[in-house]
Image (tube, grey):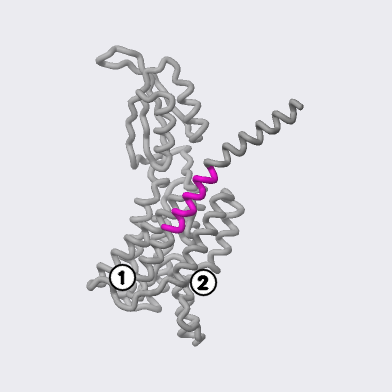
Amino acid sequence: MTNSVETEVAEMMRNEQARPILKLETQRCIGIVVGSIIYAFGFNFFLSPLNLCAGGFMGLSQIVDIFLRNVLKLDLGSVEFPGIIYYVINIPWLVVAYKTMRRRFVFKTIFAVTCFSVLLTFVPIAEDLILEEKIANTLVAGLTCGVGIGIVLRMGASDGGMDLLGMIVIQKKGHSSVGRINLIGNMVLYAICLMIYDLPTVIYSLVFVAVLSFTIDKVHIQNINARVHIVTQKEDSSTLELEIMGQLGRGVTKWKATGAYSGKEETVLMVVVSKYEIRRLRSIINEIDPRAFVLIDEGVGVVGNFLKKLT
């Protein structure tokens, strides 16, 4: 009888823990859809009418599409094949991610890549330039597509291609950014583009990718480090330390201090987190010591044993 009650209680506890996770992941999937819509809007309304190379795996998909239509003379009709090609060439990267990264991240990435491919295939392409100036369309395309990809990354997923490669590299190396790796990889692609497109088109394409990469890094806040100092007057700060280390998986450094005005003894805790984790950290602090003084420095550089949690 006792074992039956214990089993029932344990099952109830698991269900209670699963509910907030399920709610959170549902919200993130909605965010992935929103990010995909924003990207498809920027791509098909601002970039495609310019006939620019999008860079990354999407740019490679465009090149393959040109090869199929113009070299092999295949009649593909009015269907926009780059989205379908993009999905196909992402399959090997998804296999690598499945073997090396968290399952939840991989499943959300598959969902994101599917959303991107479907929307890019079926969202209509603008026949004329939305804005009068070509450079204006290029900049808006970079900003819009960058925001879309950044939102997907922020939801703990990836849109695949160079961004997925970037996350795998960062996971292993720990130093770099998705946008920077995206930019470096595109240099190789645009060297190939010089043989297909004219020079002005390649230059505009590079401007697009530069704006795209910059925007991704600004929206993808998991890539931004923050140093947090917590000043608490609690006699025993161990509860706060354990909660930070347990919930966030981050190390904590502490030292004793004395208030210059009050003369009271205080404890200073220092922890380095990603900007993405700040909300959870503040929630922990408010729950345990709402009177604590908190100082947050964003954009700090970190050298040493610091784990970048991108997913």
Amino acid type for the residue under numbered disc 2: Ile
Which segment is the magenta one? 21-34
**Residue at the spot 43% in from the left edge and 24% down from the top edge:** 288
Q: Residue at left 33%, top 40%?
A: 298
Tell whether 132 sits left or right of 180.
left
Q: Which mark is residue 296?
A: none
Rendered location of residue 271, percent (x, y): 41, 32
Residue drawn at the location 51% of the way across and 45% of the way down: 23
- Name the quarter where the N terminus is drawn: top right
Element type at mark 1? helix
Judged by its main secondary structure, the magenta piece is helix
Asked whether 76 or 195 is in front, the reply is 76
From this viewpoint, which residue is outermost toward the left? 132
In percent of width and height, residue 108 lies at 53, 54
Crowding at dot 1, Cα within 10 Å, few <14 / some 14-19 / many 20+, comes out as some
68 in relation to 253, above or below: below
Relative depth, front residue between 242 and 38: 38
Front residue of 42/256: it is: 42
| Residue on which disc 2 sits | 84
Q: Is residue 220 above or below residue 261?
A: below
Residue at figure coordinates x 58%, y 41% from the top left: 18
Give the percent coordinates (x, y) of residue 285.
41, 28
> Counting residues from the N terminus, which is met first, the one under dot 2 or under dot 1?
2
Q: Indicate whether residue 47 is drawn in magenta.
A: no
- Give the quadrant of residue 216: bottom left
Which labelled disc corresponds to residue 203?
Answer: 1
Dot 2, how many residues are within 10 Å of its Cα: few (below 14), some (14-19), or many (20+)? some
Q: Is 165 displayed left or right of 125 in the figure? A: right
Q: CA distance from mark 2 to mark 1?
A: 26 Å
**For discs 2 and 1, the disc positioned in front in the rendered view:** 2
> What amino acid type is highlighted by mark number 1?
Ile
Determine whether the residue tagged by mark 2 lies in a helix, strand or loop.
helix
